[in-house]
Image: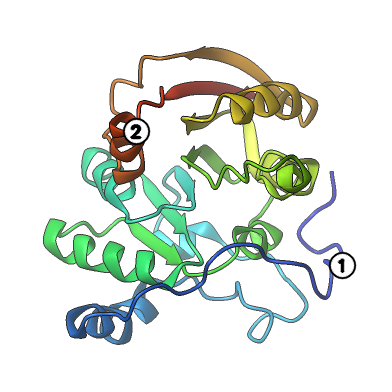
Amino acid sequence: MSDATDSPPEWRNFYGRIRGHTLRASQRAYLSEDLDTLRPAGVSRDENPDRNPIEPAALFGDDRPVWLEIGFGGGEHLVHMAATYPDIGIIGAEPYVNGVAMLLGKIRAAGVSNLAVHPGDVRDLMEVLPAASLDRVFLNYPDPWPKRRHHRRRFVTREHLAPLARVMRPGAEFRVATDIPDYVRQTLVEVPKAGFDLVSRGGDPWPDWIATRYEEKALREGRVPHYVTFRRR
């Protein structure tokens, strides 16, 4: 595996929404008042053109275990985990501005202080995290990209899984929740290739799980959630 200091691509495609409906005044205030204090320094190419590794300890003030949620949506699960595990540092990565604004409102309401927020592509973050720096990673209801020609855009491809494996320590846990059977199929094929062992799969969520808006929508529409756990070799 390469380290964070290896030369990253100068440009790459990003698929998905960046903005949605017009933000409410309160959401604009969250972004202007709260985001800068929660955003990890050194992730953007402008402030870190050499892509030097950032130190997770600098985000949380100590060497506590660090978790990552990839694509946190509206932030329900991320805030729940932060409140449940106050001694863990958790980074959330989400490029959708509306989702970031919703999360910031939830952080204010919950009063949690062990979160960092990267409002962008998680690949940029994984480039600058040190090797073996994450103890747990969550991928909850990722964009399914249902058309076959778009399956290469899914997170569970080598482009994403190789850098993910690099930043996870041996024994670290990778959780995937989805309501798309074909996403489960691709996950079970591709994730082990990247250096992970399957621990469990099934229809029962993890004991500390909290339902998200995406799961509730899936259940309303008759789709069955799947919960898959891997461990980094």
Instruction: Give the structural element (helix, strand or loop) at label 2.
Output: loop
> What amino acid type is highlighted by mark number 1?
Ser
Label 1 Cα neighbours within 10 Å, binned few <14 / some 14-19 / many ≥20: few
Quickly name the residue at label 1.
7
Quickly name the residue at label 2.
221
Residue 231 lies, with reference to residue 12, above or below; the image says: above
Quarter of the image that includes the C terminus = top right
The answer to whether residue 233 is visible is no
Residue 13 at what x, y percent from top left? 75, 67
> What amino acid type is highlighted by mark number 2?
Glu
Quarter of the image that includes the N terminus = top right
Residue 124 at what x, y percent from top left? 66, 65
Residue 123 at what x, y percent from top left? 67, 59
The answer to whether residue 38 is visible is yes
Instruction: Give the structural element (helix, strand or loop) at label 1.
Output: loop
Label 2 Cα neighbours within 10 Å, binned few <14 / some 14-19 / many ≥20: few
The CA span between labels 2 and 1 is: 44 Å
Residue 100 at what x, y percent from top left? 37, 67
Q: Is residue 21 left or right of residue 109?
A: right
Q: Nearer the viewer, residue 19 or 194?
A: 19
- Closest to the camera, between mark 2 and mark 1, is 2
Residue 10 lies, with reference to residue 60, above or below; the image says: below
Q: Which residue is located at x 59 percent, y 59 percent?
A: 122
Q: Nearer the viewer, residue 13 or 148?
A: 148
